[in-house]
Image (cartoon, rainbow, N blue to C red):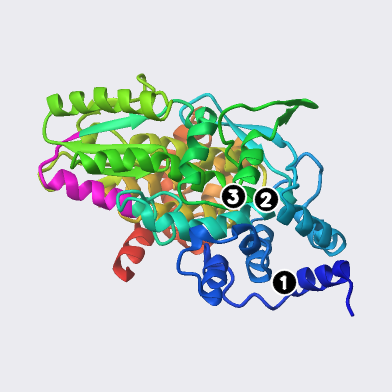
Amino acid sequence: MISGEAAGRVEILDAVKPGSDRKSRGGGAGASRVTAKRGYSHPEMLQLMEAVVERENMKTAWLRVKGNKGAAGVDGMTVDVLLPYLREHWSSLKEDLLAGRYQPRPVRKVEIPKPGGGMRQLGIPTVLDRLIQQALHQVLQPIFDPTFSASSYGFRPGRGAQQAVAQAKVYVAEGKRWVVDLDLEKFFDRVNHDILMARLARRIKDQRVLRLIRRYLQAGVMGSGLVSPRTEGTPQGGPLSPLLSNILLDDLDKELERRGHSFCRYADDCNTYVGSRRAGERLMASLSHFLTDKLKLKVNEAKSAVDRPWRRKFLGYSMTWHRRPRLKVAPTSLDRFKNKVRERLRGGQGRNVKRQIEELIPLLRGWVNYFRLAEVKGVLEDLDGWLRRRFRCILWRQWKRSYTRAKNLMKRGLSEERAWRSATNGRGPWWNAGASHMNEAFPKRFFDELGLVSLLDHLRLIQSTS
């Protein structure tokens, strides 16, 4: 006979055995298999904690956490040592979870800069807590997701930002040419725990799961060696936070649906499209009251507005003013992209240009893939020119001396007289990078041969194959 502890070890080892992850990376797929295999028709009435710690669900959660990697939490444990830890401690961990005794560790406070200025606070859970949160997420998502609004696009299986932006374009084309752009002030920091738990309790009957989620909400935040208690908010950084935000904001979605409005929401970014400014202003006032009164959330008046859609951005996109609007990359998204490129190239001064291009390619491809719905393509052509100019500027700086500059320009086919005149013109690197002598010496063909991705060409390729 196998002891309880040994059986637990065999179970977790079997659950995370390398090479056994058959179709295990789909969001929530493990939980779906659990409920389907057991034949439950009303998963909200389950003993949900048993579904959370079930072998297939834990295997899927472990593979997801392993694939995401991520930083260590307050205990310093990395993803690499999680499996050995589970081999030794899974039996007791599972027992604590089933008995409702498990206590999460505090999250590690991390601050990152916001694109629009200021700092965003993240809370990094320990890798063990990330595993348990992921397992919870996989069980809860199939319960709550079918009840969410069709106009909610954030952090949901099979949905994304591009679908939200495409739908927003449809609303504007239908004549709703005013947008109520609603920004919630510090949403993730202001979530009311009692209201959120009440929404969860509508469909979750397992008190152990409810208690565990509340413990995660109330787990302290460690910063500078001190743990601060938390009475509100759900810090970004854990696998469970996006689902909890959708559960809370589903009340907002249902209210907008009840009123018959056309809207798109992605996490805490919500745009509602109306036919006139006056209608938009009335809606803004009533929604502000609803959010404050019902959900205890505050609208950021400085960032919220009733305006024309082409004067605002939504998920990085904007659109033209035409009756049949065309999607485009928002100006702030262009600035953010340029800053990222500058940061990458600034760290590579003095290095081989080909190597720098190779390291930049993932950023370029990922950026174009996100903005694959863009229909105004002149901006990407300008960006292509700007990128080539950045690399010409790097070359000019690397040459340093006038003699080296003249010599290299002559190697690229310029006459001796023109090469020396250009090398000694006394202008700065950026000016020279855009001048005719550098464009002639290093044309687009040169950078194509080095593998520099053309943003415009890559966009056309994506759009032609989609």
Residue 404 vertical position relative to residue 42 in the rendered view, above or below:
above
Image location of residue 394, percent across then percent down: 56, 42
Question: How many circles with numbers are drawn on the protein?
Answer: 3
Identify residue type, mark 3: Pro
Q: Which residue is mark 1?
A: 15
| Residue 452 visible in the shown view | no
Give whichever of 459, 183 is nearer the camera.
183
Distance between the alpha carbons at the discs numbered 1 and 2: 17 Å
The N terminus lies in which quarter of the figure? bottom right
Query: Magenta span covers which residues?
Result: 163-178
| Image quarter of residue 216 | top right
Q: Per the image, is 121 magenta?
A: no
Q: Which residue is mark 3?
A: 239
The C terminus lies in which quarter of the figure? bottom left
First reached walking from the N terminus: tag 3 or tag 2: 2
| Image quarter of residue 265 | top left
Task: Check disc 1 and report its element: helix, strand or loop.
Answer: helix
Image location of residue 440, percent across then percent down: 41, 50
Q: Residues within 10 Å of mark 3 (few under 14, many from 20)?
A: many
Image location of residue 236, percent across then percent down: 57, 39
First reached walking from the N terminus: tag 1 or tag 2: 1
Q: Which residue is mark 2?
A: 130
- Residue drawn at x 44%, y 45% is 246
Residue 407 vertical position relative to residue 146 in the rendered view, above or below:
above
Distance between the alpha carbons at the discs numbered 1 and 3: 20 Å
Identify residue type, mark 1: Ala
